[in-house]
Amino acid sequence: MITIPGKIPVTIHPLFWLCAAFLGFMYSGGQLGALLLWVVVIFISVLVHEYGHASTALFFKKKPKIALVALGGMTTYDGDLPLWKQFLIVLNGPLAGLLLAFAAKGCTFLAFIPLFLRIACYLLFYINIFWTLVNLLPILPLDGGQLLRIVLEGFFGFRGIKITLFIGMVLAGILAAVFFTLGAFLIGTVFLLFTFEGYQSWKRSKEITSSDKSSEVKTLLSSAENALMQGNKEEARAAFEEILRYTNQGVAYKTAAQYLGLLYYKEGRKKQAYDMLLNVQDSVRKEPLFLLHELAFLHEDYALVTKLSSQCFQEYPQKEVAVKNAKAFGRLSDPISAGGWVQSAHRLGVDTRDLLKDPAFDLVRKDREFQEFVEHLQ
């Protein structure tokens, strides 16, 4: 990874060169000189485009950073800005690309330009015209989608973000189908990825609330996560608790609640950890999900254990999870599910002869269906 320092630092990831080389190979006919020319043209085009974003952010007193990644570039900056300033920052990326395209086109008319530079200028013109038109489509995360998001957010607030995601998802799906029909599989695949990402984002957007856009909440969440990464658990806990005092819904709330559940548990405050995770039980994933499953069993909330059983086992296919699932279903008089989980525990190495002596199976022990599951395990 290469980092170029300056007022606008630029980081170039190795995957950027690989993707640029792949595109160059596809369109260069396998000739090394033409491939290198394509790589240089792609690099210049993406960099100029991102400088259009970054220089505008710098003009607005922000500290922008550019990263050239696998499929293009990304410009980030610190803090928030009014929507009209965000609009200009986004718009000036495509405008910079258009200026580059027409400047390159103008150079092709100069008689003293060598042939290879003339070819490079033609490539710069056509690539930037094509990419600007594609990039202005109202599909997130393209610039056109960002521009539409800013406009609709200005008119409709958070509902505008959801509308933008829905429009982009539908349009990307249509374009994917069109390009696949035409045999343009590469660009069709790109739009198919946009469709999938748009759908996932649209689903997640239903959880977004006004508090998630609050700069105070964003700052608190960022500082809490940074403190946690640095091992400052008390500072992190205080910041997460502050978020919960600020809001009781939304993505930030659910994120803070899951972190707090983990922190409370590590501090030995199991009841508080359980209550915290219980409030966001439909959103927990990975480690918080495993912990909620464990705490639900500990607090004899067997209905919740069974609700989380399959999802938790998919994330953590461990014998402890299978045993808890089997016991919970036994407590709830579900002989088929209890027997199935006993079999799963057996496959993971659990001594089921001892397991089946547990009082958790008293309600299903004599059930014929349960016995069919476990008779060969004893």
Image (cartoon, rainbow, N blue to C red):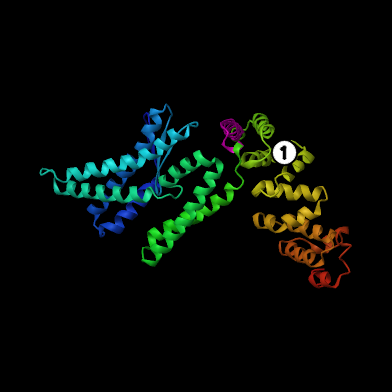
Question: Which amino acid is tagged 1?
Answer: Lys
Which residue carries the number 1 mark?
266
Q: Position of residue 320 (x, y in %)?
A: 74, 55
Neighbor class of circle 1 (other Cα within 10 Å; few <14, some 14-19, many 20+) is few
* Residue 278 placement, left or right of 199: right
In this view, the residue farthest toward the top is 61
* Residue 75 placement, left or right of 119: right
Q: Position of residue 23 (x, y in %)?
A: 33, 54
Q: Residue at x 81, y 58 (%)?
A: 327
Residue 223 is a magenta residue: yes
> Is residue 318 shown above or below 141?
below
Q: Main secondary structure of the magenta part?
A: helix
Residue 319 visible in the displayed image: no
Residue situated in front as seen by the camera: 208 or 336? 208
Instruction: Please give the count of numbered marks on the rendered protein.
Output: 1
Could you tell me which quadrant the C terminus lies in?
A: bottom right
Q: Position of residue 363 (x, y in %)?
A: 88, 63
The magenta segment is 211-227
